[in-house]
Image (cartoon, rainbow, N blue to C red):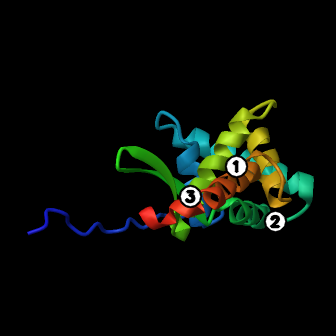
Amino acid sequence: MSRRSIIEKKTIKSDPIYRNRLVNMMVNRILKNGKKSLAYRIFYKAMKNIKQKTKKNPLSILRQAIHRVTPNVTIKARRVGGSTYQVPVEIKSAQGKALAICWLLKASKKRLGRNMAFKLSYELIDAARDSGEAIRKKEETHRMAEANRAFAHFR
């Protein structure tokens, strides 16, 4: 008998202002040392800054940025016969969104700027315009997967 049990998917709650699950996923990734109110403050300041800069709905900019950064494939290291191969693997949309959020936050942390809210807002605006560090990371991942397509049969 298998020891593995079926894992129930956790339903993500929506945030108090935008009533959106994507926002809550983003805030949970910003979160450090359990300071959720600080994470919400950073995120809402970023959204306010996006609204001032673009004069558009910041939620649509966020959706567009995450959609543009979400990868279709990723590479996983597979050990076959003593050597390691980088095998391209298709990923589900939920995992792709999680990767996109992670890449957006890493790219915004690397940016030069005043504070995290400004850096995050500028990175989201750049990603929505199809430029920036997070977009480059997605393209690099796709390029690596394309280059290692010959090892796809090792899945």
Question: Separation of disc 3 and disc 2 at Cα?
Answer: 31 Å
Residue drawn at (91%, 61%) of the image: 55
Is label 2 in a helix, a strand or a loop? loop
Residue drawn at (90%, 57%) of the image: 54
Would you name the residue on which mark 2 appears?
Answer: 57
Q: Judge by depth and name the residue closer to the eye, 16 or 5.
A: 5
Is label 3 in a helix, a strand or a loop? strand
Tell me residue 113's x, y (percent).
81, 31
Question: Separation of disc 1 and disc 2 at Cα?
Answer: 26 Å
Q: Amino acid at mark 2?
A: Asn
Q: Which mark is residue 106?
A: none
- Tag 1 and tag 2, C-beta contact below 8 Å: no
Kindly tell me whether residue 15 is visible in this rendering: no
Q: Residues within 10 Å of mark 1 (few under 14, many from 20)?
A: some
Would you name the residue on which mark 1 appears?
Answer: 137
Kindly tell me whether residue 153 is visible in this rendering: yes
Question: Separation of disc 1 and disc 3 at Cα?
Answer: 11 Å
